[in-house]
Amino acid sequence: FISLFFGSGQNSATERIVGGYAPVPHSIKYIVSIQTRDRQHMCGGFLINKYWIVTAAHCNIGLHKMLIVAGDYSLTIYEGTEQQILPQLLVPHPAYNRTTNNSDIMLIKLRAPINLGSFVSIALLPRQGTTIAEGRVCRVSGWGYTSPSGGQIPSTLRTVKLPIISTEKCNSSESFNGSITENMICAGYSIGGKDACKGDSGGPLVCDGRVYGVVSWGKGCAEAQFPGVYTAVSKFRKWIDNTILSYYSRCNNN
């Protein structure tokens, strides 16, 4: 099983969102690219207010190695809509387990606020405990990874529509065989062919206008019987709200 994250130790995947399409430029305004300081895209994420971003905990490459880019569409072309901000604080979920991928979610506090406007906006989150029905069609977006070693097309954002798969089906012996916890959601087609892939980690799975999932892990990409696995945002809504609230109440007390 792989995390959908392009780390130094892994094969350089040339896939991006598999089986998807390029959306209208700047139509997915809440997505951000999480990059290394030398501008290598590592993961996706999404803005939940002008200071805070949600991504996957396994995208934690360290505070001083990270750069956040909002308002981007093509990573290789300067469009003049981009905003680059450094992170001030990384808060991976305290229960994140690298082995099981459980609680694979992280908050990033930015050093300066993102300017919201025509090219950047915030994503809405579901309420704590809300479930999303099997068969509901959602969409996941990301830049995935294109090899830096020449010949790649401009790496524009990609998006793909995927149905929610029940945890029962996803946990069956033909599929993930019990590895899907209550903090995870599966989405994809049993025939495969459409999925998130390496470099899409941390990106948003949006259903009914709210982010219900964070791209987390899978087995290969777009393989039959193995849908993509996402962190279930509604299980962490209270944690997100409380973490942000406690950050500000701490600041006010100092």
Image (cartoon, rainbow, N blue to C red):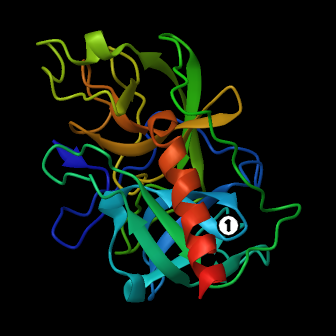
Element on which disc 1 rests: loop
Q: Can residue 125 be seen in this view?
A: yes
Up the image or down, 182 lies above or below 221; here it is above
In which quadrant is the N terminus drawn? top left
Residue 76 in sight:
no
Residue sitting at the far right: 118
Left or right side of 144 for 79? right
Q: Residue at x 39, y 28 (%)?
A: 185
The kind of residue on which mark 1 rests is Asp
The residue labelled by disc 1 is 72
Q: In this view, does 29 lie to the left or right of 22?
A: right
> Residue 152: x and y, percent?
46, 65
Whether residue 248 is situated above or below residue 208 in the rendered picture: below
Residue density around tag 1, few if under 14, some if 14–19, many if 20 or more, within 10 Å: many
Q: In the image, what residue occupies the spot 20% across and 47% down? A: 2
Q: Is 192 rendered above or below residue 15?
A: above
Name the residue nearer the viewer: 114 or 223.
114
**Closer to the camera in the image, 171 or 34:** 171
State how many labels appear: 1
Image quadrant where residue 5 sits: bottom left
Q: Which of 83 and 240 is in front in this view?
A: 240
Residue 145 x %, y %: 40, 60
Outermost residue, front side = 253
* Quarter of the figure with the C terminus: bottom right
- The structure residue drawn at horizontal position 39% and vertical position 55%, both measured from the top left corner, is 56
Give how far across and how far down residue 85 sits, in percent.
Answer: 62, 82
Q: Residue at x 56, y 77 (%)?
A: 250
Q: Where is residue 166 in the image (x, y as percent from the top left)?
A: 37, 13
Left-right relation of 138 to 8: right
